[in-house]
């Protein structure tokens, strides 16, 4: 006997709520992916940017 296929349809109210939530989030944060939580960086790990805050990478100054 074949297994019975289940019909899993999501109600329109839930779909509308998800779409509205997604649109509100895009208005607040802009398009694209935005992480909700960030990994905390350890102070024990060497980072030249933290040691030399005038480094090119931090200020965005090109070496031209």
Image (cartoon, rainbow, N blue to C red):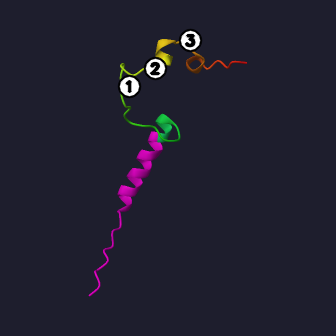
Which of the two discs, 3 and 1, labels the residue nearer the N terminus? 1
The range drawn in magenta is 1-25
Q: Quadrant of the N terminus?
A: bottom left
Residue 54 lies in quadrant:
top right
How crowded pointer 3 is (Cα within 10 Å; few <14, some 14-19, many 20+) is rated as: few
> Between disc 3 and disc 2, whose residue precedes?
2
Q: Hey, which residue is sitting farthest bottom in the picture?
A: 1
Separation (CA) of disc 2 from disc 1: 10 Å
**Residue at horizontal 41%, vertical 54%?**
16
- Residue drawn at point x = 29 percent, y = 85 percent: 2
Question: From the viewer's perspective, is the residue at label 3 or at label 2 nearer?
Answer: 2
Rounded to the nearest whole Å, what is the CA distance between mark 3 and mark 2? 13 Å
Residue designated by label 2: 47
Q: Is residue 5 magenta?
A: yes
Residue at image position (28%, 80%) is 4
Q: Are marks 2 and 1 in contact (CB under 8 Å)?
A: yes
Q: Is residue 36 above or below residue 52?
A: below
x and y, in percent, of residue 61 in the image: 64, 18
**Which mark identifies residue 54?**
3
Could you say whether the residue bearing mark 2 is in a helix, strand or loop?
A: loop
* Residue 44 in picture, x, y percent from top left: 36, 19
Q: At which x and y percent is residue 60?
A: 61, 20
Quarter of image, res 11: bottom left
Q: Is 34 positioned to the left or the right of 64 in the image?
A: left
Membership of 20 in magenta stretch: yes
- The disc placed on residue 41 is 1
Local crowd size for mark 2, using a 10 Å CA cut-off: few (<14), some (14–19), many (≥20): few
Query: Tag 1's secondary structure?
Result: loop
Above or below for 4 versus 29 = below
Q: Calculate the distance from the C-alpha at mark 3 to the C-alpha at mark 1.
A: 20 Å
Q: Nearer the viewer, residue 32 or 21?
A: 32
Residue at 35%, 56% in the rendered image: 14
């Amino acid at each position: 006997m074949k297994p019975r296929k289940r019909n899993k349809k999501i109600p329109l109210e839930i779909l509308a709520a998800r779409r509205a939530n997604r649109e509100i989030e895009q208005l607040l944060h802009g398009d694209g992916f935005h992480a909700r939580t960030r990994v905390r960086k350890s102070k024990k790990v060497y980072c030249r940017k933290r040691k030399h805050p005038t480094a090119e990478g931090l200020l965005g100054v090109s070496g031209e």
